[in-house]
């Protein structure tokens, strides 16, 4: 079943008429992935809602920085309050750092007190590559019309030090509040920072 | 049922993956309390003059399998951060990074250092520090250490103790630091241009046409200019090197792009490019070695040419009899199609294997040669001359002027029956029958000298396949066996005719030689060719006698001597290194001091092969006749410092004169302070300078 879903995701993504990498201001590529419970989640189902995509790898020091400081959970909670759909995506390939199965994903979410709407598994890296996700974390925001409005880092302090969260500008929270106020996103792209996404070598 | 099995396998797979992950992770993670990349701080000298600068090196030693990052880490990673704790008044400059390397993991680009490396930092000591004061320098360094699998942010506390010396004291230098400095990119000095054309990023770098980058790669320091993991292609348009690669998907408009152009391993140029027009791609340069060294069409063309050449080999007088003999035996062996096919395949593999082995030997020789500094490029008139001689000799051989000695070893092997016999016949046809294959082997040899490795091997493989093709056809199409033409005098006639294209090739090479080395060079080349031709004629005349090949020895010596003398005798090709009309000698500080003692006026200039401004000044001003006359009249000594390879002593001298790179023009008139000339020279400026 799960294998079928993965294959399905691959087909769904490849069939989508998009360029090699998503462009801010253009429609976000659609995808379908299994969540930690094995249920399929499709991006286009959230049309009419703002969606945040968070690339994650629970063992990456830069991801740990934002979870140990509570920064990511805070952003997830704020998003949930405003009706924003937060999708955490793990593209680590089997055998690579941070690869999780459904059970491990659920226990990560519970232990970290994370609040994503869904934790999606992308072990083949298909969706990660379509979005050109390079680092963990790497953040994307899709607006209610399905347009990509933000791609880049979580904030502007590219360090692994949790102490740097305090003085940083959280690009995702800033963009969400601008979207909520009906304004354009002022910082629509930034340089993502972190560990490389652990795609399979093939 | 199927679903059950699937779940079970899933479980096993997950378990294995977990075990594997655990094993690799625990094997790779550094021991607690020990960094994967050991960092230490050293100073070039322990004493620093007040008001002076001392260079520090942050020496990084990654454990095996680990790497550290360049300032721009690429698709992921972070740059090194240093938090200094310096005595009052001291200031530390930016981190100077050596030329990095590339590492692609899972399709993502990393700009890294996989071996030991040193990041240099200049620390300025204020003038009001009392001599003898202890100056403890401390820093906290944060950097990222990664393997292909995991990343660990590391912190190192480093320190070095300095002492304030005597004001104006000598600046110490150390060979270790010279080595570190040599690894830094050198400032190019000229501005580049970049543009975005559709989804492509294009960059034009002013680089003299004479510079041949062995492994070009542009490391962008500016983020968002280009897609890091995309292939880069390089081409030439005169004195401009053009880099083309993919632009990133969310590219912003950039006011400037900074980066390092690597020419060869560890040798890079630092440059800034501004938006502007980039000329269309010119002559393609061997693209970066690691990704796609040869274009497919080039290899296919070489392969096809070799295939035809191999086919032609079959009608050569001493291959054809072997072939017809074999065909006859196949025809005789009766209708067993299976045996015929197997023999045909054995023959083909024999022929191809020998050809590939010959190719491998040649390529090995070539690799040894380029390691020894021989340039196998068509831009070198000596290589053209060598090819001219080779092609002429081949043509004369085809024309029947002389014969190559026959070898008859291996005949025994070929007489064996069955597949083994067929294999050895193939090998024999390709190797032992060299008297006839020689001409085409010679052509392949010439090609192997100048083609990239893959294409050269393709030539040899194609030659073998072409040679085996008729036999292959005979093995698989029985009807052909009975229609084979008989050996006869027609083969000798065909051989004569085949000498015509070879003579035409020789003519073409002579023309290229003339273009490159001038009319004198061409005349000299043709004279050597004539000597060789006469020698071969003589040999042909004596053939059949015991020592028929003896005359070749003096001729070969003459050719070698000519090849050595050739570039000096020829009018230097327009692209060769600048031959200034000024009498000059290499720059050393000792020689400069000596000339100053002699109270001679001295003109010192620093140049590099990759510096376009330098070359323009040399052509447009320094090599002018009026300048040479004015310098000669005043007996001006000329010292030239060549900074092409980033010589450290010259680098320090440049720095002392406030320059980070070339060009630098200095004039020492006796009894006057040194005069620094502008970066753009004119002949009149130089003439007025000395008068």
Image (spheres, rainbow, N blue to C red):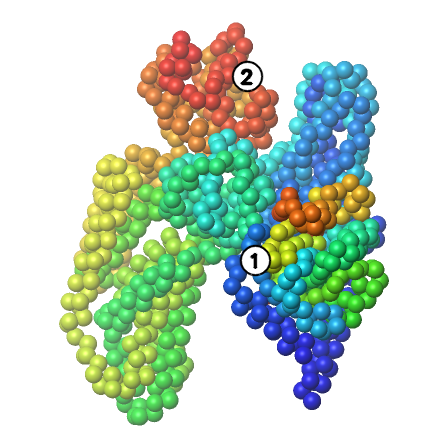
Question: Which residue, given by chain and number where applicable, does mark 2 sit on?
Answer: B593
Tell me the SS state at disc 1: loop
In the image, residue B40 above or below residue A117? above
Q: Say whether residue A139 is left or right of residue B595.
A: right
Q: Is residue B244 visible?
A: no
Q: Identify the residue at image location x=55%, y=16%.
A: B593
Tell me the SS state at disc 2: helix
- Where residue B296 appears, as percent x and y from the top left, is 40, 60
Q: How many marks?
A: 2
Question: Which residue, given by chain and number where applicable, does mark 1 sit on?
Answer: A27
Q: Identify the residue at image location x=61%, y=70%.
A: A9
Tell which of B311 and A78 is nearer to you. A78
Contact between labelled residues 1 and 2, with CB atoms less than 8 Å apart: no
Of the 4 image quadrants, the one containing the C terminus of chain B is top left
Q: CA distance from mark 2 to mark 1?
A: 70 Å
Q: Say whether residue B550 is left or right of residue A196.
A: left
Tell which of A93 and B586 is nearer to you. A93
| Residue sitting farthest toward the top | B671
**Labels 2, 1: front one:** 1
């Amino acid at each position: 079943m799960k294998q079928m879903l993965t294959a399905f995701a691959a087909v769904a993504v490849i069939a989508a008429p998009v360029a090699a990498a998503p462009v801010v201001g253009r429609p976000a590529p659609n995808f379908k992935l299994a969540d930690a419970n094995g249920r399929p989640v499709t991006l286009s189902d959230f049309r009419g809602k703002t969606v945040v995509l968070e690339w994650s790898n629970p063992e990456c020091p830069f991801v740990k920085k934002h979870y140990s400081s509570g920064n990511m959970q805070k952003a997830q909670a704020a998003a949930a309050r405003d009706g924003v759909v937060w999708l955490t995506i793990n593209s680590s390939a089997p055998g690579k750092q941070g690869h999780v199965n459904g059970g491990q994903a659920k226990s990560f979410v519970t232990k970290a007190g994370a609040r994503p709407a869904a934790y999606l598994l992308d072990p083949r890296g298909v969706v990660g590559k379509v979005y050109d996700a390079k680092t963990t974390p790497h953040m994307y925001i899709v607006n209610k019309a399905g347009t990509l409005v933000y791609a880049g880092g979580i904030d502007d302090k590219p360090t692994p030090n949790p102490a740097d969260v305090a003085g940083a500008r959280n690009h995702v929270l800033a963009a969400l509040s601008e979207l909520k106020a009906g304004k354009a996103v002022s910082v629509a792209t930034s340089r993502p920072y972190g560990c490389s996404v652990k795609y399979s070598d093939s | 049922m199927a679903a059950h099995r699937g779940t079970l396998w899933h479980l096993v797979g997950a378990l294995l993956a977990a075990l594997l992950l655990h094993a690799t992770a625990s094997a790779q993670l550094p021991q607690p309390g020990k960094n994967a990349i050991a960092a230490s701080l050293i100073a070039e000298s322990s004493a620093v003059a007040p008001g002076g600068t001392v260079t520090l090196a942050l020496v990084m030693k990654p454990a095996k399998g680990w790497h550290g990052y360049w300032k721009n880490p690429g698709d992921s990673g972070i740059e090194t951060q240093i938090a200094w704790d310096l005595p009052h008044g001291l200031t530390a400059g930016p981190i100077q990074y050596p030329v990095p390397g590339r590492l692609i993991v899972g399709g993502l680009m990393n700009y890294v250092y996989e071996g030991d490396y040193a990041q240099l930092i200049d620390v300025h000591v204020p003038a009001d520090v009392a001599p003898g004061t202890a100056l403890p320098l401390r820093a906290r360094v944060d950097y990222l250490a990664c393997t292909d699998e995991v990343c660990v942010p590391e912190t190192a506390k480093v320190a070095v103790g300095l002492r304030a010396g005597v004001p104006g004291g000598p600046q110490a230098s150390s060979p270790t630091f010279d080595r570190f400095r040599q690894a830094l990119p050198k400032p190019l000095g000229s501005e580049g241009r970049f543009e975005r054309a559709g989804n492509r990023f294009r960059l034009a770098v002013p680089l003299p046409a004479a510079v041949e980058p062995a492994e070009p790669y542009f490391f962008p320091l500016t983020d968002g200019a280009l897609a890091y993991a995309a292939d880069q292609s390089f081409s030439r348009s005169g004195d401009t090197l053009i880099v083309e690669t993919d632009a990133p998907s969310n590219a912003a408009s950039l006011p400037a792009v900074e980066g390092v152009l690597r020419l060869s391993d560890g040798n890079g140029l630092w440059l800034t490019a501004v938006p502007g027009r980039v000329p269309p791609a010119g002559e393609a340069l061997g693209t970066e070695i690691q990704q796609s060294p040869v274009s497919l069409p080039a290899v296919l063309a070489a392969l096809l040419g070799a295939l035809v050449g191999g086919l032609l080999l079959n009608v050569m007088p001493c291959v054809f009899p072997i072939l017809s003999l074999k065909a006859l035996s196949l025809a005789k062996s009766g209708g067993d199609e299976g045996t015929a096919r197997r023999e045909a395949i054995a023959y083909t593999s024999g022929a191809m294997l020998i050809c590939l082995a010959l190719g491998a030997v040649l390529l090995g020789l070539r690799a040894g040669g380029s390691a020894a500094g021989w340039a196998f490029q068509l831009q070198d008139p000596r290589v053209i001359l060598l090819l001219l001689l080779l092609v002429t000799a081949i043509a004369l051989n085809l024309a029947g002027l002389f014969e190559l000695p026959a070898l008859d070893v291996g005949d025994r092997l070929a007489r064996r029956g069955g597949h083994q016999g067929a294999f050895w016949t193939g090998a024999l046809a390709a190797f032992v029958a060299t008297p006839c294959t020689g001409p085409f082997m010679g052509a392949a040899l010439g090609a192997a000298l100048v083609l990239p490795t893959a294409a050269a091997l393709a030539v040899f493989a194609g030659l073998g396949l072409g040679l085996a093709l008729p036999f292959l056809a005979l093995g698989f199409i029985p009807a052909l066996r009975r229609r084979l033409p008989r050996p006869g005098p027609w083969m000798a006639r065909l051989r004569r005719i085949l000498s015509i294209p070879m003579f035409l090739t020789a003519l073409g090479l002579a023309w290229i030689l003339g273009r490159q080395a001038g009319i004198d060079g061409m005349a000299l080349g043709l004279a050597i060719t004539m000597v060789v031709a006469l020698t071969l004629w003589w040999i042909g005349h004596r053939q059949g006698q015991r020592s028929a090949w003896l005359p070749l020895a003096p001729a070969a010596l003459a050719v070698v001597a000519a090849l050595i003398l050739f570039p000096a005798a020829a009018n230097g090709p327009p692209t060769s290194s600048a031959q200034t009309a000024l009498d000059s000698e290499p720059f050393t500080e000792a020689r400069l001091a000596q000339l100053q003692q002699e109270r001679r006026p001295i003109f010192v200039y620093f140049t590099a092969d990759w510096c376009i401004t330098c070359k323009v000044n040399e052509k447009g001003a320094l090599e002018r006749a009026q300048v040479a006359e004015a310098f000669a009249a005043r007996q001006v000594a000329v010292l030239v410092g060549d900074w092409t390879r980033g010589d450290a002593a010259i680098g320090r001298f440049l720095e002392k004169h406030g320059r980070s790179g070339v060009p630098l023009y200095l004039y020492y008139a006796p009894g006057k302070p040194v005069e620094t000339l502008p970066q753009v020279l004119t002949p009149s400026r130089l003439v007025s300078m000395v008068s």
